[in-house]
Structures are given as C-alpha cells and as structure tokens.
Amino acid sequence: MNRVFNFYAGPSTLPLPVLERIRDEIVDFRGHGLSIIETSHRSSEYEEIHNGTIANLRELLRIPDDFEVLFLGGGATFQFGMVPLNFLDSSSSCDFVVSGSWAKKAMADAKKVGKVNVVFDGAADKFTTLPDPKSVKPSQGSRYLHITSNETIGGVQWQEFPDTGSVPLIADMSSDILSRPVDMSKFALVYAGAQKNLGPAGMTVVIIRKELVEKCNPDLTAYLSYKTHAVGNSLYNTPPVFSIYASGLVLEWIKEQGGLAAVTQRNRAKASALYDAIDGSDGFYRCPVDRSVRSMMNVVFRLKSEELEKTFLEEAGARGMLGLPGHRSVGGCRASLYNAMPIDGAKALAELMKDFARRHG
Ligand code: PMP
C-alpha cells in the first residue's frame, strides 16, 4: 500500500506501527482467542488496557496525583456543555477567552447554563491573535476561566498560559494535547477529543483536579456528573473501549519516540518547514495569524485567489497529500501536523509549495 500524507484536521493520521499492531491484534487479542472489542469492559484483559492507558497518559503529561484522568464519550463537544452543567448555574458566572470557532461553541453552551464574561475577544482581528497571558485576569466571583489551547480552524495556539490564581483554569486541548510538555498544575480541568493526537474518535480525555470533582453539581443525571466517572474509574458504564485501546498504543508509540520532548522537537521542525515556505514566498502564500501565536499543529495559509488555491489543492492531492483544504467555514488551506505526521510529509508539502510558487508566481 502506498500511504498518502494525511493532513486532515481530525480524525487524522495515526502512527503506522499503531495501525499495524491493531491489524495484527484485532481478531485474536494477544492470544486470548477473542478481540479486544468483544471483550467485557469488566474483564481483567480490558482492565489492564484501561489502567495502562491512564498510567501512560499520566506519565507522559506528568499529571500530578491530585488529578483524576477520565475517559468519556460524546466528543469534546459534550464537554462544552458538561463543564458549565457541573460548575455553573443561572446565578453564577464564568470567564471566556474567545479565540476562535471552538471557543465560541464552548461559550454558546456555557451561556445556556449561566452568565459568561468575555475577558478577551479576537473577533475584531478575525481571530488571528491571542491576548498576552499576563493580561488575562478572571472576573470577580468567576467559577472558572475557559481557554482553547489551540484553535484548530484558525491556527492560533497559546504559547504560555494565563495564571488565574484561585479561579480554576479550564482548557479545551483537543487539537494540541500531547504535542508539547505542559505544566498541568496550572489547570483545574483539561479536556480533549482523542481523534487528533491521541487515537481514533470515540473517547474524550478529561483531566480534572480532585478538588474540583467535589464541586460538581450534585443534581445532575449520572452520566453528566464528573463525580460519577471519577468514582467509577471511567467504568460506570461501558467506555469507548476501542478508542481507549488504540490510544493506549499511540501513547506507547510516543514513549518509544522519546516522549513529549522528542515529539515537540519534531513538531517544531515540521511547522517551521511550512512557515518558512510561507514567509520565504514573497507574499505568494500568506498566513493570517500573528507570528507570536502561530500554531504548530494547524498551519493555515492563503494563496492570492481562490482559483489558485483550488489548483494548488488539486496538485497536492495528485501528489498524495490529502486533507489540505481549510475548514469549510473559512476556506483557504490548512495543513494539520499532529504528532503522527512524519517530518517527510511536512518537507514534501513545503517542497510542493516552493515549486508551485515558482511556476505560478
Ligand atoms: N475543540 C476543538 C479545539 C476541536 O478542534 C474540535 C474538533 N475539531 C472540537 C472541540 C470538537 O470535537 P468533537 O468533534 O470531538 O466533539
């Protein structure tokens, strides 16, 4: 098989050794005579996978002991509602940094539950920038402050995080979790859908401070409460077993790569290859994002016309580079460079960009 370079924003490319291992194990899981996806989630075989995945996530992200690691269903979108349902009510307020499409969606759900103060709004700059983290201060009495660590559509990424003192900092890390080391102790809750840096869609990781678990709304139905999942080690009901199993393999792969330090270094090199191609193109390509907050995960760029963009995307496709159109809401081009994208993929795209600019400039 000729594998393409897959630049999709999510679901997105997975490490080939992980896919091969899944292929090898999917019918007969490690000699047990059945597949992991037909094994009870109460079996010792599954339990080992479940707890091993949690342990590897804890190790790689250096998650302090006073945090719970939960595996939930419903995607990151479910967290947009679950966070306010647990920690907000009609008489209380939270803070939002509105950095792009995903922050807006999370905020829209929070507004259904309580009051929202906007502490930064990037709309006037078309979501091409972020606030100085030092300038981000929570409002008086705020229940939490929500940020989106990487805006997958706009291609803006926080480089450092705000200090919110006693107000819990909550982050949607769906599109950059495990792409770089992060000081988890700054956060009270982090959530991320699996389908970018972790594994196949189906599971959402929630990393939550134990202290915050105690503050969950006690009147929620069982699944909606973080406490239910914390008490049950994410086995209150049937968890998304396939996604958890495959994510476990991805975590092992990250460890084999040398952990987050090695992965970050490679991610930086991949992003630089593309940003250098953009910056060295004499305006043929344009990245709208403020340089200081350019994303290492989702590199967005425009060409001079939509027609030229269409030709470029067609050429890329013909050369085995897929998933490069920008999100349907914004157009343009976007190259997603998650952990599993090999450096050769980024180099091939950078070469095509340079060559295309020479021919069409
Ligand atoms: N937040 C961010 C930053 C995302 O990129 C996405 C998906 N692309 C979501 C939330 C929504 O995730 P899901 O589709 O898993 O609900």
Image (cartoon, helix red, strand yellow):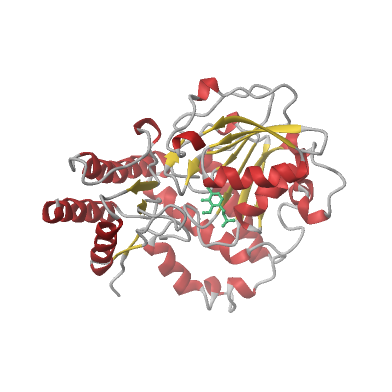
Can you name the residue that lies furthest to the right here?
Answer: 219
Indicate whether 41 appears above or below 91: below
Residue at the left extreme, as displayed:
359
Left or right: where 227 falls relative to 26: right
Q: Nearer the viewer, residue 296 or 84?
A: 84
What number of labels is visible? 0
- Residue at the image point whose x is 47% and y is 58% from the top: 10
Q: Is residue 242 above or below residue 309?
A: below
Query: How far across and how far down the image is residue 261, in percent?
Result: 39, 38
- Coordinates of residue 97 in the picture (x, y in percent): 58, 34
* Foreground of the two, 232 or 6: 6
Residue situated in front as seen by the camera: 201 or 247:
201
Query: Residue 281's quadrant in the figure?
Result: top left
Q: Quadrant of the N terminus?
A: bottom left
In the picture provided, is 324 more to the left or to the right than 223? left
Q: Position of residue 136 (x, y in %)?
A: 57, 24
Tell me if 223 is positioned left or right of 68 in this view. Answer: right
* Above or below for 92 versus 235: above
Q: Is residue 238 above or below residue 186?
A: below
Q: Is residue 180 visible?
A: no
Q: Residue at x 38, y 42 (%)?
A: 296
Residue 143 visible in the current orientation:
yes
Q: Residue at x 40, y 50 (%)?
A: 339
Residue at screen point 61% across, 56% down: 75
Q: Position of residue 189 (x, y in %)?
A: 65, 38
Q: Could you say which is closer to the camera, residue 88 or residue 271?
A: 88
